[in-house]
Image (tube, helix red, strand yellow):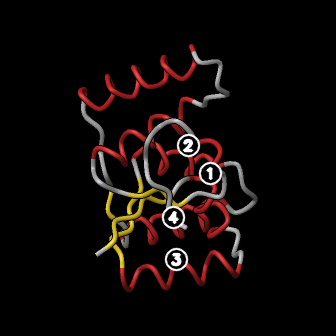
Amino acid sequence: MEKICLDTGILTEYLLNKKEIMAKIIQLEQTADLAVTPQIIFELFCFAEASEKPEENKQVIRDLVLRLTTIDWTAEIAEEAAKKFTELSKESKNVNLREVFLGVLALKNKYQVYTDNPEAYEGIGVKLYK
């Protein structure tokens, strides 16, 4: 079974009812272990809180999260992510802390990352779902 961690961009598109992404995630739920991280859940709840219908949107997120695996981080993973972030920053790559952290977390837990922004994961070493 494939292991795929969904990033914030993909989940935002899903929650905005983008048909193509919705269909893909529904299909993947049948064949893969789909995961999120606590950070992504936090970001989604922030999005819901700022929306016009926060309670309704938070319930949609709660229902979604119940169907997914939550992969958590450890001090060891945080340390590795910090090292990778520093390496990429020194190489003058346009790096984002969130993507480096998610990429290292997924890599260490043997997950691919499903993203709508593959460039954000360059140099991390994590496999991207296509």
Q: Nearer the viewer, residue 120 or 37?
A: 120
Q: Which three-letter amino acid code belongs to the residue tagged 2?
A: Tyr
Q: On the image, numbered disc 2 is attached to which residue?
A: 121
- The residue labelled by disc 1 is 118
Identify the amino acid type marked 3.
Ile
Of callouts 3 and 1, the N-terminal one? 3
Mark 4 touches mark 2? (CB < 8 Å) = no
Sequence-wise, which precedes: disc 1 or disc 4? 4
Q: Earlier in the sequence, mark 4 or mark 2?
A: 4
Give me the C-alpha separation between circle 4 and circle 3: 14 Å
Q: Which residue is mark 3?
A: 25
Side of 130 where 127 appears, left or right: left
| Contact flag, marks 4 and 3 (Cβ < 8 Å) | no
Q: Which residue is mark 4?
A: 61
Can you say whether 27 is above or below 124 in the image?
below
Where does residue 53 sit, x and y in percent of width and height? 70, 63
Mark 1–mark 4 Cα distance, whole angstroms, equals 24 Å
